[in-house]
Amino acid sequence: MRWTSAAGRVLLVLVVVMTGYVTSGARADEGGAGGRGPLTLATAGDLTGYLGPLLQGWNRTHPGEKVHLVELPDSADETHAQMTTDLRDGDRSRFDVLNIDVNWTSEFAAAGWIRPLPADRFPLGTFLPPVVDTARYDGRLYAVPYVTNAGLLLYRKDVLDKEGVPPPRTWAELEHDAKTIAPKYGLGGYAGQFLPYEGLTVNAAEAVYSAGGTILGDEGERVTVDSSAAREGIGFLARGFREGWIPKQALTYKEEESKDAFQDGRLLFLRNWPYAYAVASAKGSKVAGKIGAVPLPGPDGPGRSVLGGSDLAVNTHARHPDSAARLIAYLTSEPVQRQVLTRGALPPVRAALYEDPELVREFPYLPTLRTALRDAKARPKSPRYDQVSLVVQAVVHDALTGRETPGAAVRRLARELDTVAHR
């Protein structure tokens, strides 16, 4: 996840009333050690500094339940490693509330690290429908969606307008423009996040999903990746590197590096999260006022993004679970969700905000993003997701660097994922 500031300040007026918090079938004692009190919230590094002010609002109005923010590394992989190390300490864990990647919910729930939440305590019906599924495991709610995300195709609108062509809707159009238009303007054609880390898993999954394929089924118990769709999707990316319309430098890109390349005027097209649009549009950017955003293309039309974002979960050994539930209700309330967007440029989970005229004027990509979110698909669910992701990264990277053909890579991916699924 990568976050950035955006203009706008919204007055926060919020009263949260929670009458109790159910754990293990019994209501917590709100007045005792198991109910309300101070909390520690762990999150990936907040690159924009937006979260601290939100928590200050809570701390001012909840002096007996103050939250201490712990920022872990901004790399998803490193944050995952530090969170899981802490959670394995059981009742010695430092963290009460966890801001976790949407794909960690299944893993953390299966491991017993986070507790089930009472669904009736949260306004899930006001959220975008696809995001709620990211917070469920085995039919139960284990987290509450906090922010969501979908990948978009950013493009140099000034360049395409000069050429008289619309933004690409298909892979063939993207490839053609990256090959023929980009070199005329001294630009690289297309980039995403192709360093072997979680971002590569996302980019690979989007390519497979856009071609109509899947990776896993049945909560990770069934491997489904060995398909013509997966070969087509991985083959599309591998061909880009082989033919040069994806620069070799993109093999070193995470979100920030790819955003910088686009913002510095070195790319015609970029797959990234909406925050990159906000940064590239800000005053001082070399491409401010020159860019647009559309849904990711696919083989025959719009493709499918991976559903990104994060969920808020409560440590099984949280010291004050009622306060933890109240904090989650606060952070997912509409006034705070509005600030998540205006201060952090992070897509909110509240559906109504995507139709707010004032917000659409300030963030013109919101209608496009809502379309992308409607069709987005979660990364493969698995209680061993960290192992699944590592396998995808390693195998797909070999395909992108030409060490394996896409066909051989997909067959190997199926074998290695089957080993993980039945370990």
Image: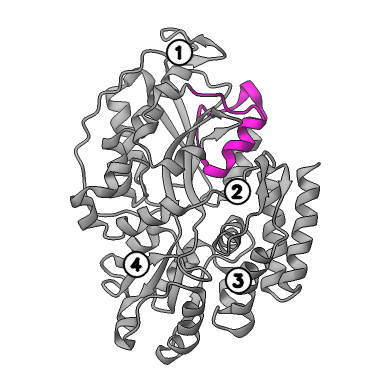
First in sequence, mark 3 or 1: give its number.
1
Describe residue 221's horizontal placement relative to residue 114 as left or right.
right
Alpha carbon separation for disc pair 3 and 1:
48 Å
Q: Which residue is mark 3?
A: 251
Q: Are marks 3 and 4 in contact (CB under 8 Å)?
A: no
Q: Which residue is mark 1?
A: 35
> Few, some or many C-alpha atoms within 10 Å of disc 1 (few <14, some 14-19, many ≥20)?
many
The secondary structure type at the circle numbered 2 is helix
First in sequence, mark 3 or 4: give its number.
3
First in sequence, mark 1 or 4: give its number.
1
Alpha carbon separation for disc pair 3 and 4:
21 Å
Q: Position of residue 289 (x, y in %)?
A: 26, 72
| Foreground label between 1 and 2 | 1
The residue shown at (39%, 78%) is 265
Q: Which residue is mark 4?
A: 280
The range drawn in magenta is 88-117
Compared to 244, does 24 lie above or below? above
Q: Which residue is mark 2?
A: 78
Q: Are marks 3 and 2 in contact (CB under 8 Å)?
A: no
The secondary structure type at the circle numbered 1 is loop
> Few, some or many C-alpha atoms within 10 Å of disc 3 (few <14, some 14-19, many ≥20)?
some
Q: Which part of the image, by quadrant, shows the C terminus?
A: top right
